[in-house]
Image (spheres, helix red, strand yellow):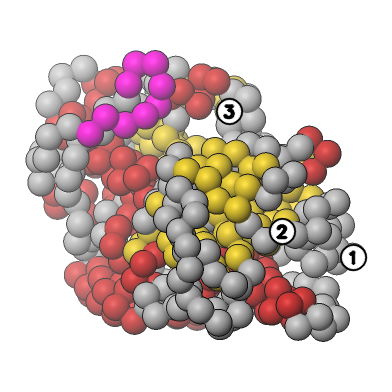
Amino acid sequence: MTDTTTLNNTLNIPTIDLPRVVIIGGGFAGLKMARLINSDEIQTVLLDENNHHTFQPLMYQVATAGLEPDSIAYPLRKTLKTKKRTHIRMTKVTNIDFVKNMVHTTIGEIRYDYLVIATGAKTNYFGNKNVEKHAMPMKSLTESLDLRSLILQNFEKALTQSNEEEKDSFMNFMIVGGGPTGVELAGAFAELKKHVLPKDYPDLDIRRMQIHLIEASPKVLSAMSDKSSNHALEYLRKTGVNVWTDTLVKDYDGNTVTTSKEVFQSKTLIWAAGVTGNIPNGIRPEHLENNRIIVDEYCRVKGLENVYAIGDVALMKTKESPRGLPMLGSVAQQQGQYLAHSIKEQLKEKTVKKFKYTDKGTMATVGRNLAVVDIGKIHFGGWFAWLTWLLVHLMLLVDFRSRLVVFVNWIWSYINFDRGTRLIVRKFSKKPDKSVSQKEELVA
Ligand SMILES: Cc1cc2nc3c(=O)[nH]c(=O)nc-3n(C[C@H](O)[C@H](O)[C@H](O)COP(=O)(O)OP(=O)(O)OC[C@H]3O[C@@H](n4cnc5c(N)ncnc54)[C@H](O)[C@@H]3O)c2cc1C
């Protein structure tokens, strides 16, 4: 097998006499697959619009000044540096032509033998344009940093406000969505309020800071057991979070939040209420259900022999999960691992087994010594659950350096009741027409 023959495409990928797998997306699913693929028998092309993989479960800690972004993001090139015949291109996929087996990107096009769509999910505003325009999402590293800047800027502004209502509205934080992200974010805000902000802003009465968690369903952490959900609610209330269940956000204009129960004045509404599939152009409507790509139990897109979808973007219905497997990192990683193996088996013309998801449990933390864990029929909370949460998240981080940095940060925070990274590295401001950040001067 020779490695280089010709460079016949605009992405500058060598054409060799091996089948080519093009993976779109270097997230949990795509990166896992790229790391495990048999590169002696397959050429891999990984396309991602970012040059890094993000460990999304800890993004809330970046947003609340607990961790620096480089502790939870890794350059794709570093992660795959030892992988042979693996080519990474930083580009956005603009279209897929399933007839010609071509992927079109912002820097050119590439032919595939096998295509793997692992483009993840994006924030779902459920059609509420005002909320989309004014709320803060938290689905990428950039958005987490924007949020961190906004939170800190709000306190700087509150400090000099003479109008008391305006002052309160800068210190009023609305979090929408009582899933793990909303709950963890609310808990982190409560810790900031209790341990950090009173020392940073002695001139402000931090007791006036309000944290509201709004959830449309009757309980928080609704995907977890009733016991864990009740524990989480109790922990949140104990730490001073105002929890509003059975409450719908109807409108937000950047100042006033209108819900089905109350009206709040707040400069910050964080939207953690849902995600939807990130569907590349070219996917036909018959391949979609609930804005996710329908796949069979081999991760194959219905009706397309050599096209697969894995991770959040894929909708795989199984006997155990008739509405589809959940949009979780564990599902994405297991599918990435499965498909790397499955394609190898196909090339050897072996019989390929169906994908089987192993549910290793779910967990969420509300803060120091407070977490909930469900593992099968076992449900526990409190300190031991918190320790379990810490260890599991440390182990899930991609490399040793990140584990060490995060571990040291957590120990430091635990001992000192402090958070290390309260920097406004670049100011955040919303453009008048769209909620896109403008990067201003460095003020670190
Ligand atoms: C705040 C937050 C907290 C979470 N907490 C947990 C948790 O505690 N436990 C858990 O199991 N799960 C958690 N999740 C869910 C978990 O992160 C996802 O299930 C997982 O990331 C899905 O992996 P994926 O590979 O499908 O997508 P992603 O990891 O999102 O990766 C998708 C990749 O595709 C790239 N991409 C997208 N479109 C294009 C395009 N057109 N062209 C090129 N590249 C493209 C993106 O840049 C990205 O790198 C959380 C998610 C969020 C947002």
Res 256 visible: no
Which residue position is annotated with label 2?
Answer: 308
Q: Position of residue 393 (x, y in %)?
A: 46, 73
Taken as a whole, is the magenta stretch helix, strand or loop?
Answer: loop
Q: Is residue 412 visible?
A: yes
Residue 136, position as x, y percentages in the image: 42, 35
Quarter that holds the N terminus: bottom right
Residue receiving disc 1: 319
What's the distance in space between the residues labelled 1 and 2, CA to CA? 20 Å
Residue 249 badge: 3
* Inter-mark Cα distance, 2 to 3: 36 Å
Mark number, residue 390: none
Q: Which residues are magenta?
A: 431-439
Instruction: Verify whether residue 103 appears in magenta.
Output: no
Residue at 64 percent across and 69 percent down: it is 19
Closer to viewer: mark 1 or mark 3: 1
Disc 2 marks which amino acid? Tyr
> Which sits in the foreground, 47 or 336?
47
Residue at 49 percent of width and 51 percent of height: 9
**Residue 65, x across and y down, in percent:** 27, 54
Q: Earlier in the sequence, mark 2 or mark 3?
A: 3
The residue depicted at 32 percent of the width and 25 percent of the height is 430
Disc 2 to disc 3: CB gap under 8 Å: no
- Return the residue nearer the eye: 161 or 326: 326
Residue at position x 48%, y 76% in the image = 3
Q: Earlier in the sequence, mark 1 or mark 2?
A: 2
Say whether disc 1 or disc 3 marks the residue closer to the N-terminus: 3
- The x, y position of residue 246, in whole percent, is 67, 37
Q: Amino acid at mark 1?
A: Lys
Q: Is residue 154 above or below residue 225?
A: above
Question: Callout 3: helix, strand or loop?
Answer: strand
